[in-house]
Image (spheres, rainbow, N blue to C red):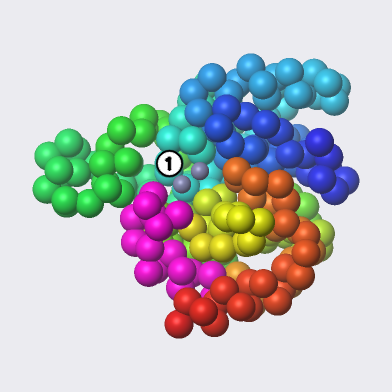
Amino acid sequence: MELVPNVHAVKLLSCTGYLITEERLTLIDAGLPGSRRPLERYLRRIGRRFDELERIVCTHGHLDHIGGVRELAAGGAGVLIHPDDAAGLAVTFREAVRARALGPLLHYFTPHPGQTMPITHGDTIPVLGGLTVVHTPGHTPGSVCLWAPKHRILFTGDVLQVIRRRLTYASSIFSHDYAAARQAVSRLAQLDPEVIALAHYQPWTVDCRATLDRLAQAAG
Ligand SMILES: [Zn+2]
Ligand SMILES: [Zn+2]
């Protein structure tokens, strides 16, 4: 489904990938292993080719977002991820157990994405007239949102979710640091999106700014 011109929501396995179709292709998030097939099917439908994929931007290092990254990068696409999650994914079993927390274990059971390129707060990815990286740690240490001011689209990965039809903070169960994940929304409240593109829900388009403001304030 084309969300706005040149931005497509593509159902991958377990998460929605956002495909940016310019001269080359950029994909935000890679789904579970096995996501190459649904992506290729979608590309065929819109008349594009898999080998046009230039980069995959990972919002964070959870299995449902980067599990498919190796097969999707097999044609030579670069893989971009925040260094805090690239480092977290290298955790050993012993370190994960010693941490006595779910986050490092989730990282341990996620296959490493292989060679990656770092993206950090304030970086601009050269698509959509400039796609800005907003570091929003908490759900994972290296969770990022991606903001396209020219199109007023905000891609949030798992930093936001929808529960009982309300936009709200990241999952309290699956966030490595839930208090930080709530606080991170204050960075998003400085933006003025028209569309919030979520990883596991339909895009959010109602009162984005006011909703983000409310969440930021309630986070304390
Ligand atoms: Zn996640
Ligand atoms: Zn997810």
Identify whether 188 is placed above or below 70: below
In this view, the residue farthest toward the front is: 164
Q: Is residue 41 magenta?
A: no
Residue 35, quarter of the rendered image: top right
Q: Which residues are magenta?
A: 171-187
- How many marks do you count on the picture? 1
**Residue at 49%, 58% in the rendered image:** 170
Identify whether 167 is placed above or below 32: below
Name the element at disc 1. Answer: loop
Q: Is residue 185 magenta?
A: yes
Q: 137 or 169, which is in the foreground?
A: 169
From the image, tell me which residue sits under label 1: 62
Query: How dense is the environment of label 1, judged by Cα within 10 Å: few (below 14), some, or many (20 and up)?
Result: many
Q: 149 or 51, which is in the foreground?
A: 149
Q: Position of residue 24 (x, y in %)?
A: 75, 35
Q: Assess mark 1: CB under 8 A from ligand 1?
A: yes
Q: Position of residue 165 (x, y in %)?
A: 66, 56
**Residue at 77%, 52% in the rendered image:** 128
Answer with left or right where residue 139 lies relative to residue 2: left
Answer with left or right where residue 205 lies relative to residue 159: right
Identify whether 146 is placed above or below 199: below
Can residue 73 be seen in the rendering of this structure? no
Residue 208, quarter of the rendered image: bottom right
**Residue at 83%, 21% in the rendered image:** 45
Q: Position of residue 177 (x, y in %)?
A: 34, 61
**Residue at 65%, 46% in the rendered image:** 201
- Specify the amino acid type for callout 1: His
Q: 120 or 93, which is in the foreground?
A: 93
Which quarter shows the C terminus?
A: bottom left
Can residue 53 be seen in the rendering of this structure? yes
Answer with left or right where residue 33 lies relative to residue 138: right
